[in-house]
């Protein structure tokens, strides 16, 4: 029993792709750029003339399932295949998924992709059925990150590193106006 | 709270067939599998680039299923980069060299027959004995080269000490020998840069966030410091810098000279340090001031505003622990040696030598070499590639000068055979056509590699080496500030018929020892006397002619003996179970989020007692007719002809030269390279994103896609090295992108004989 969440010290990201490769290797995601549980998105751009560039607007954003507490995908699934597990992670009853893609269309964060191998819509589940299932306490993306910018842990545990950092630092969530209550936090 | 609008995902071009992963990685079957379900975590050292980070390999039922970082290793700071993670796909790459092969077609056409190891050794023996006999036992008719850090010394022991050739070549002369030499000759040691301890860091050109060096790149992400980046291209490192100073390529030396000018003119340098350690300080001071290397002068050369140079110089010399980062990359231009020297001198003027945040000497662990009996070959001649080069590396020589002498047939004796280990010489040095010409002149080319590279396709015999996950290597000592020992443990048995280098050399040594001894006995008078005196058997034995001597014991036995003798059982156990040992391994502590402190602050070797001087003036250079001190010459000015562009190179974060472009997972990020062209220039030329363009230099042309961008200077173009592979055996890399070395003119500087990679101008034509 935990309430898992992730916080990103996002400005440290150098877009090295280590997290993306680690995730694919750990979770056996099919090859192909379209198949991924997480990705890094370039936000903004470097503007101006070469000799006078404005570099402030470019950021590398860590993108993946935002673990909404009020998850649009869960509500949208006509088969009731999506649920929130004991650790607060949005999960899928694989056998109940018949690829209606309703969840994909409902997700405002574009977090899901079609896993053609298993005939389901797949997304980040914090390595729940791989690393966490083996008793490890880190996700693949987190442990491999050169910048160590990904904080992962239990929000219900006040002493956890993620709880501490959310107390110390300012943060924002993506598209808060939708009321999805994401559990992924971007640290300022 | 801030709101951020996200767009739909943007993907890189293309996608590969589904489930390739499953067939190449997970469903892979090998005869070495265990039948019961087992899960093991085995400590290993990565080999996807030169860093050698430490990791744990998860092995499930005999198959490697995941690579994770090893938190015990101070050097790699508990991380694995994308390439490190993708090491599994290097292991299970279906294009790997699997069996010994002998060429049946023309060189380069890729037609080989599969043979046994013994047949391959036998073929090599027949050829080599004839060649050495015809060359009257001049062993230097063999040239041998190596591009991999691990096992290099052992490879040299075999072909140099044992077989007797003087002609060893490595990547140093197409990489960073000027930097190593400049540091060694200026402060008496190559040192180590303490990036983590620096509060003010200037980086010229080194792209530490896209070309990771551990621990430097990682430390830059974690410590509070001001970062100043100079680059003719706005790299990710430049993007992240506190100050980015765009400049013309090849003009960093002018910037350095003007920094020295400000320090000397405004007396900002560390006077106590200078007084104690500098030799010929007055000469340097007079030179810099008299030549008037003012920021105003440097502005004209570099395009960096004078007032910015004043500001950076003043900040640097008033910082507590300033560091001018010396780089770690290929040589740019003729002034490279003095550019690196200028950087060392700037650090020295600030007193940033042998102290926190500077160039430190530290205290690395010293590993003893195993002793072997080395034969002496009286008919062997010396190397010739350092003729005309002032210093040069006696160890690794000068590739371009070597190749030039061979192809123009000016060598003092014939070089007739080459042994090439993990060194893709067909792609790694300027002017590929000349490398091909050189290889075509050889009577025997043997390649030891894991992949069918362009160079392997030129071989007569291909010997498949196993990857780093399939072998144990000899223990290695790492770093100076926080020294450690690390051991590459074997994760799984070698796949197919591949073998470790040690096993390959053992087999080769056994096959060659006796016949080559007979050749020596025919020509070598001293050996003849020895045989007369001792008899053949004893002369062979005592003379050290057993080429496989080092391999009487396997590597595990050798490691165990070596480590336990000098460091004890506990260290050995640590290396076998944790992959690493350092004195504080049991008390190292996590600072934040899986990021560790290894040595306590007060135990790090920031300063050590050492007698040394800072040499401002190198007399040997003066005598040879070169500048004794860093000096600007007008021909260093950046003046490409109208309509032409200076070509500069670099790499993507997901690739290590040509070694990774066939990796199925890494190619999802960069499948091919594109040429960066300034956006305004591209617009004027009618070139749009993705257009095919022809780039031409005086020696060749390539076709490549254009990437117009504001992130590069108008007179400059850039594209990443490592692409444009010609070998059709590399399914995923073949025909993707363009090779820079088709275009780069083969020039080398004369201080270290290093190839100058950034002196070629090219033209662009839209297809």
Image: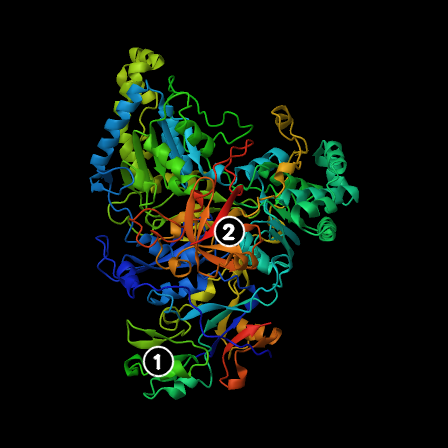
Residue B478 appears left or right of B129:
right
- Residue located beneath label 1 in the image: A92
Colour setup of the view: rainbow
Count how many numbered circles sit on residues in the image.
2
Q: How crowded is mark 2: few (under 14 residues within 10 Å), some or many (20 or more)?
A: many
Residue B453 at what x, y percent from top left? 34, 45
- Residue located beneath label 2 in the image: B718
Q: In this view, does B306 lie above or below A167?
A: above
Please name whichever residue, A187 or A16, is drawn nearer the observer in this view of the structure. A16
Quarter of the image for the N terminus of chain B: give it. Answer: bottom right
Q: Residue furthest right?
A: B266
Q: Mark 2 lies on which chain?
A: B
Task: Name the residue located 47 percent from the left edge and 66 percent from the top edge.
Answer: A142
The verdict on a common chain for dots 1 and 2 is no
Q: How crowded is mark 1: few (under 14 residues within 10 Å), some or many (20 or more)?
A: many
Q: Which mark is residue B112?
A: none
Residue B371 appears left or right of B545:
right
> Nearer the viewer's eye, disc 1 or disc 2?
2
Residue A183 at what x, y percent from top left? 50, 79
Residue B394 at what x, y percent from top left? 49, 29
The secondary structure type at the circle numbered 2 is: strand
Q: Which chain carries label 1?
A: A
Residue B657 visible to an observer of this rendering: yes
Q: Do the residues labelled 1 and 2 touch (CB within 8 Å)?
A: no
How far, Cα to Cα, is label 1 from label 2?
Answer: 46 Å
Residue B493 at what x, y percent from top left? 28, 49
Q: Quadrant of residue B665?
A: bottom left
The secondary structure type at the circle numbered 1 is: strand
Please name whichever residue, B631 or A18, is drawn nearer the observer in this view of the structure. B631
Residue B475 visible to an observer of this rendering: no
């Amino acid at each position: 029993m935990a309430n898992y969440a992730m916080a990103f010290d996002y400005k440290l990201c150098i877009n090295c792709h280590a997290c993306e490769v680690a995730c694919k290797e750990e979770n056996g995601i099919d090859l192909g750029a379209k198949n991924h549980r997480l990705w890094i998105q370039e936000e903004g751009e470097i503007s101006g003339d070469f000799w006078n560039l404005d570099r402030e607007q470019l950021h590398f954003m860590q993108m993946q399932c935002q673990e909404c507490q009020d998850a649009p995908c869960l509500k949208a699934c006509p088969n009731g295949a999506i649920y929130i597990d004991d650790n607060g992670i949005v999960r899928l009853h694989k056998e109940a998924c018949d690829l209606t893609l309703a969840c994909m269309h409902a997700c405002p964060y574009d977090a899901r992709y079609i896993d053609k191998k298993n005939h389901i819509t797949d997304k980040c589940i914090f390595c729940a059925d791989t690393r966490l299932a083996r008793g490890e306490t880190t996700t693949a993306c987190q442990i491999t990150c050169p910048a160590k910018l990904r904080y992962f842990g239990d929000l219900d545990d006040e002493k956890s590193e993620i709880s501490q950092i959310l107390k110390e630092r300012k943060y924002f969530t993506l598209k808060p106006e939708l009321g999805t209550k994401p559990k992924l936090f971007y640290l300022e | 709270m801030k709101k951020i609008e996200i767009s739909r995902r943007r993907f890189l071009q293309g996608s590969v067939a589904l489930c390739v992963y499953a067939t190449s990685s997970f469903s892979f079957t090998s005869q070495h599998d265990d039948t019961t379900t087992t899960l093991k975590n085995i400590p290993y050292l990565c080999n996807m680039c030169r860093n050698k980070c430490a990791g744990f390999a998860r092995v499930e039922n005999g198959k490697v299923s995941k690579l994770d970082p090893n938190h015990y290793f101070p050097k790699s700071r508990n991380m694995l980069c994308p390439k490190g993670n993708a090491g599994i796909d290097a292991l299970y790459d279906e294009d790997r060299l699997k069996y010994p092969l002998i060429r049946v077609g023309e060189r380069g056409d890729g037609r080989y027959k599969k043979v046994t190891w013994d047949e391959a050794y036998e073929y090599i023996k027949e050829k080599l004995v004839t060649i050495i006999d015809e060359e009257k036992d001049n062993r230097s008719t063999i040239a041998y080269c190596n591009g991999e850090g691990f096992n290099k010394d052992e490879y040299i022991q075999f072909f140099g000490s044992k077989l007797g050739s003087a002609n060893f070549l490595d990547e140093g002369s197409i990489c960073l020998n000027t930097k190593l030499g400049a540091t060694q000759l200026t402060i008496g040691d190559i040192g180590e840069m303490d990036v983590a301890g620096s509060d003010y860091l200037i980086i010229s050109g080194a792209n530490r966030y896209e070309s990771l060096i551990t621990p430097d790149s990682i430390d830059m992400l974690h410590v509070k410091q001001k970062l100043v980046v100079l680059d003719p291209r706005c790299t990710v490192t430049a993007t992240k810098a506190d100050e980015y100073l765009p400049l013309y390529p090849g003009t960093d030396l002018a910037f350095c000279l003007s920094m020295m000018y400000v320090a000397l003119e405004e007396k900002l340098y560390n006077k106590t340090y200078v007084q104690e350690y500098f030799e010929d300080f007055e000469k340097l001071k007079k030179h810099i001031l008299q030549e008037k290397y003012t920021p105003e002068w440097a502005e004209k050369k570099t395009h960096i505003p004078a007032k910015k140079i004043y500001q950076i110089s003043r900040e640097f010399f008033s910082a507590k622990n300033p560091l001018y980062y010396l780089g770690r990359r290929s040589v740019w231009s003729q002034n490279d040696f003095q550019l690196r020297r200028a950087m060392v001198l700037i650090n020295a003027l600030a007193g940033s030598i042998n102290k926190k945040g500077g160039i430190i000497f530290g205290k690395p662990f010293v590993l003893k070499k195993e002793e072997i009996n080395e034969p002496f070959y009286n008919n062997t001649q010396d190397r010739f590639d350092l003729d005309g080069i002032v210093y040069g590396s006696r160890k690794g020589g000068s590739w371009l000068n070597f190749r030039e002498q061979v192809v123009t047939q000016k060598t003092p004796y014939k070089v007739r055979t080459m042994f090439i280990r993990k060194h893709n010489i067909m792609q790694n040095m300027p002017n590929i056509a000349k490398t091909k010409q050189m290889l075509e002149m050889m009577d025997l080319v043997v390649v030891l590699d894991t992949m069918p590279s362009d160079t392997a396709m030129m071989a007569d015999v291909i010997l498949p080496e196993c990857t780093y996950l399939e072998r144990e290597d000899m223990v290695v000592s790492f770093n100076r500030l926080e020294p450690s020992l690390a051991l590459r443990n074997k994760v799984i048995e070698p796949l197919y018929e591949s073998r470790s280098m040690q096993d390959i050399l053992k087999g080769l040594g056994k096959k060659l020892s006796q016949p080559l001894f007979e050749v020596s006995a025919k020509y070598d008078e001293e050996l003849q006397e020895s045989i007369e005196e001792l008899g053949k058997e004893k002369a062979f034995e005592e003379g050290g002619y057993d080429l496989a001597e080092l391999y009487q014991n396997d590597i595990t036995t050798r490691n165990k003996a070596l480590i336990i003798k000098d460091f004890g059982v506990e260290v050995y156990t640590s290396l076998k179970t944790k992959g690493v040992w350092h004195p504080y391994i049991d008390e190292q502590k996590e600072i934040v989020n899986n990021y560790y402190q290894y040595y306590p602050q007060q135990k790090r070797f920031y300063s050590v007692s050492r007698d040394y001087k800072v040499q401002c003036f190198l007399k040997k250079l003066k005598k040879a007719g070169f500048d004794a001190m860093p000096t600007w010459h007008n021909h260093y000015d950046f003046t490409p002809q109208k309509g032409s562009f200076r070509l500069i190179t670099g790499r993507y974060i997901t690739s290590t030269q040509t070694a990774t472009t066939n990796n199925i997972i890494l190619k999802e990020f960069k499948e091919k390279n594109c040429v960066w062209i300034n956006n305004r220039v591209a617009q004027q030329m009618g070139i749009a994103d993705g257009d095919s363009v022809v780039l031409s230099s005086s020696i060749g042309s390539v076709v490549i896609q254009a990437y117009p961008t504001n992130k590069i200077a108008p007179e400059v173009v850039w594209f990443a090295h490592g692409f444009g592979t010609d070998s059709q055996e590399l399914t995923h890399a073949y025909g993707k992108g363009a090779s820079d070395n088709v275009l780069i003119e083969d020039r080398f500087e004369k201080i270290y004989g290093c190839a100058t990679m950034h002196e070629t101008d090219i033209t662009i034509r839209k297809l």
